[in-house]
Amino acid sequence: MSFADELIRWYHQNKRDLPWRHTTDPYLIWLSEIILQQTRVEQGLPYFNRFAARYPTVSRFAAATEDEILNLWQGLGYYSRGRNMLATARIVQQQYNGLFPSAYQELIKLKGIGEYTAAAIASFSANEAKAVVDGNVYRVLARYFGIDEAINSTTGKKTFQQLADELLNRDEPALHNQAIMEFGAMVCKPKKPACGICPVHLNCYAFKHNATTALPVKLNIVKIRKRYFNYLLIMDGDNILIHKRGLGDIWANMYELPLIETDGPAEPHEILYLQKNRPFTIGKDSVKSISPVYKHVLTHQHLYVRFIELDGVADTSSDDFFFTEVKKLKNLALPQIIFLFLTKFLN
């Protein structure tokens, strides 16, 4: 039995029961694929269920506002995915009459859909013979065949795609793709792979050469930027001062507390001096409380976040700063670290 056939047999016996595997609707498959980018299935599943219930069709999704999408997306991270999804849904509504495409050549034209996602949707919805190569597939192929080309290099990407194309079961591409992806997620895991129950371990290069920790190879090209966020917590009775972020940075168009970003750790009096240049003023700038510093890790940034509660009512000269009732915070798309802090602080 071939390598691919072994994985398909394993899949039939061990696959997880996931809702997007019970449909060939390209819209719902797209929804699941975008949500699961950079996200574990366990974390993404509740989000998929909420989005599918709230927006059962692409037309319903396209009619939503950005605030509504980002609010439902809250806590999932990589918020540009949610904004790209809304843009794509509106394009599908306008240019495809609300019928989500299932052909690879049409899918690849849409915003936020790359080669992997287009191949996955085309394969799972229309059984198009397109081999998918995601992180799980890279890992399985690198270990089994002993490929030490870096998976994030130009040469490596081409090598793995060619191999995946050669291995693809063209009679059952959807089944083949699901099988190898599931196998990578459940058996050939990044850490502590379950080699003891692996049906193909006897012919696996990494198993025979004790190289499971060495493969796959990935170039370390990510440069981490450190940022220091000092949030001002300003209350007026049951109202709280909120700021809407602009474009061109993390958490674009989401809501937050008034922010003073510093180049490094700073004392509260230094931070409050800097707020004089902001489009709001504070009647009394006495500090009521200071939170610990919370480290919030993003892919290319490490944020060091502190919350400073101030005594005094702010006057603002900008529409980007406004007071809102505390009970209405749940309707705003807030970054998760702010949402969690306020939930604890205000209860």
Image: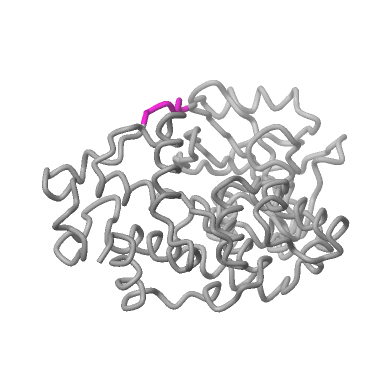
- Residue at 48% x, 55% y is 39
Going by the image, does 331 lie left or right of 207?
right
- Residue at 69% x, 55% y is 70
In this view, 223 is above or below 8 = above
- Residue at 32% x, 75% y is 14
197 drawn magenta:
no
Closer to the camera, 303 or 257? 303
In this view, 232 is above or below 105 = above
Quadrant containing the C terminus in the rendered view: bottom right
Write down the quadrant of residue 58 in the picture. Answer: bottom right
Where does the image place residue 221, in percent across and percent down from the top left?
42, 26
Where does the image place residue 306, in percent across and percent down from the top left?
52, 39
Quadrant containing the N terminus in the rendered view: bottom left
Closer to the camera, 342 or 175? 175
In this view, 32 is above or below 82 = below
Closer to the camera, 60 or 170? 170
Q: Magenta: predominant secondary structure element? A: loop
Going by the image, does 120 lie left or right of 69?
left
Looking at the rendering, the stretch of residues picked out in magenta corresponds to: 219-224
Q: How many tags in the picture?
A: 0
221 drawn magenta:
yes
Where does the image place residue 104, in percent across and percent down from the top left?
65, 53
Closer to the camera, 51 or 172? 172
Write down the quadrant of residue 327 in the picture. Answer: bottom right
Colouring scheme, one of rainbow, by chain, secondary structure, one colour: one colour
Where does the image place residue 3, in percent across and percent down from the top left?
28, 59
